Amino acid sequence: MERFIKVIVAGLDNAGKTSILTALDKKYDFHKDIISLTPTIRVEYQATEFLKNKIVFWDMGGQEQYRKLYQEKQDVYFADTDLMAYIIDIQDTKRIGTSLAYLDMIMHNFKKHNMDVPLIISFHKFDPEFRGNEEMVDQIEELKENILKKYPSFKILFQQTSIYDIISIVQLISYGLSVFDEKFFELSELLEKYIKEFDSKSLIIFDKNGIIMSEFYNDFIEPEIYIELLEFIKEHLFLLKRMQEESYETDSTFLTIGNELISYLHRIKLKEESLFVSVVMKEKLKEKFLEKVSDFLSDLTEILKTLRI
Ligand SMILES: Nc1nc2c(ncn2[C@@H]2O[C@H](COP(=O)(O)OP(=O)(O)OP(=O)(O)O)[C@@H](O)[C@H]2O)c(=O)[nH]1
Ligand SMILES: [Mg+2]
């Protein structure tokens, strides 16, 4: 049951849409590509795959003349949208009102044509240095409330993103895509169960392109290991790309970076598709993990088999 999924990526000019798509495509070593980006002219298309589906991102250039054009030719641009990622530059405080007005214009089109489009709204350029910034966090909370109130009939998810935090970018698209299959809920329950059994820090299932199908984090992640954990996950994105590109002999590998944590990456082959399990845990729990991992992998495979892959 292959299908095309049309994902509109919209927001004002300079919001960071093309940067997000570039980062998503490359996963690492993309900063030099982002520095040389120029404003998008009308729409650029970028295709990828998620499970058996072909996803086409419509990167909608956000300059004023294009926003007008989209409004005039709504049928061309907004028809058959399966998902919209709307990008708000949270550092461009002066233009947040303009951005909300543009969002409203698009929402108006969806309503007019009875299109029930799920949305993922990203507060972008939420760079790591803003994490503890209360003023910004409060502003984001207020924006979320207002948006939810304004569009009560739409399914809306929110995410904070920054190109300096590649995982936030991967999550943005992953959350959006997970609305397409209810099996993702079962997957999430399984991860919740096993993260407890392993007492691991994170448990993530990636598809072959590094899109997160499901993820779970331990409630207790010590601040001093947080950065290390993210490094491991980044390393896994890198490694799974290599496992895909080169013919890797083994299907699983342990990595050690810091002095407390270790990580495990395992490739599961299903029909023609490869999926990846990423686990980060304390080194001292490795033996316990190895005792249970085969149960986990077989339970997981059972669920994955029922997904449309
Ligand atoms: N600080 C910061 N800057 C970012 C981030 N993402 C993108 N940028 C910068 O924002 C600028 C605009 O990025 P683009 O991706 O070209 O913006 P766009 O939304 O595609 O703009 P249009 O194509 O004109 O609609 C670039 O200079 C990027 O380097 C981010 O997360 N943090
Ligand atoms: Mg652009």
Image: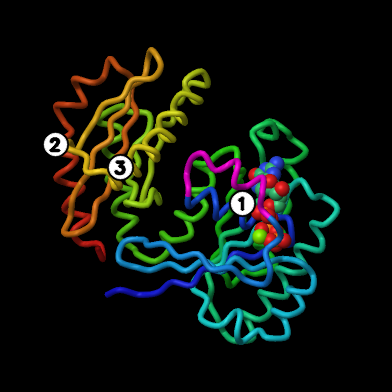
Q: Which mark is residue 191?
A: 3
* Left or right for 254, reference 15: left
Vertical arrangement, residue 151 with respect to residue 168, above or below: below
* Left or right for 127, reference 79: right
- Tell whether position 34 is magenta: yes
Q: Amino acid at mark 3?
A: Leu
- Residue 144 visible within the image: no
Q: Amino acid at mark 1?
A: Ser
- Tell whether position 270 is magenta: no
Residue 298 position, x and y percent, is 14, 45
The magenta-colored residue range is 26-37
The residue to which callout 1 is attached is 19
Residue shown at 45%/54% (left/top)?
Answer: 174
Color encoding of the figure: rainbow
Q: CA distance from mark 3 to mark 2?
A: 14 Å
Residue 150 position, x and y percent, is 70, 68
Q: CA distance from mark 2 to mark 1?
A: 39 Å
Q: Amino acid at mark 2?
A: Ser
**Which mark is first along the chain, 2 or 3?**
3
Mark 1 CB near ligand 1 (8 Å cut): yes
The residue to which callout 2 is attached is 294
Residue shown at 40%/33% (left/top)?
Answer: 235
The quadrant where residue 122 appears? bottom right
For the residue labelled by badge 3, is the local secondary structure a helix, a strand or a loop? helix
Residue shown at 73%/85% (left/top)?
Answer: 72
**Which mark is first along the chain, 3 or 1?**
1
